Amino acid sequence: MILSSDVAHDVNLKPSQVGVALSSIGFDTYVGDVMIAPVSTGAITLAPGATSPLSLVGRLVPQTSADGLAAVSAVFNNFIHGKNSDVVVHGASAGPSDVRLRVSGVVFFC
């Protein structure tokens, strides 16, 4: 199954004073301790002092454990009933290759 979502979420962090242009950015999406989907976007400019909307595309990870199946089931049930699901994303990748992504906190070093 392919996932596609437009994400525009305000995070209660101090906005960066530095902008960065990336050829791509990727995240691993978790529900609790279960990684349900890697998601990514193409080229994006993260503007300084601003919220940057992201159009993310990904693919569900096949789940075989009871916890994994319950997590994916809960997300779909919430979607069908028009409810939000709490998910956590961890930074997984950023491009171009000369940009390093520090996974804890999504910190960029140029």
Image (cartoon, rainbow, N blue to C red):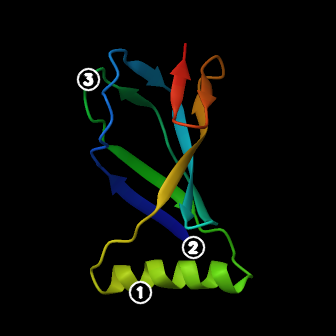
* Left or right, residue 27 beside residue 77: right
On the image, numbered disc 3 is attached to which residue? 49
Which mark is on residue 6?
none
The residue type indicated by label 2 comes to: Met
SS class, disc 2: loop
Determine the CA span between mark 1 and mark 3.
36 Å
Determine the CA span between mark 2 and mark 1.
16 Å
Task: Look at 39% across and 71% down and name the residue there.
Answer: 85
The residue type indicated by label 3 comes to: Gly
Task: Look at 52% across and 27% down and name the residue there.
Answer: 107
Front: mark 2 or 3: 3
SS class, disc 1: helix
On the image, numbered disc 1 is attached to which residue? 77
Mark 3: few, some, or many residues within 10 Å (few <14, many ≥20)?
few
Say above or below: 64 vs 98. Answer: below
Q: Position of residue 6 (x, y in %)?
A: 34, 54
Which mark is on residue 1?
2
Front: mark 2 or 1: 1
| Residue 71 image-quadrant placement | bottom right
Mark 1: few, some, or many residues within 10 Å (few <14, many ≥20)?
some
Say above or below: 72 vs 31. Answer: below
Q: Position of residue 84 (x, y in %)?
A: 32, 72
Say above or below: 79 vs 54. Answer: below
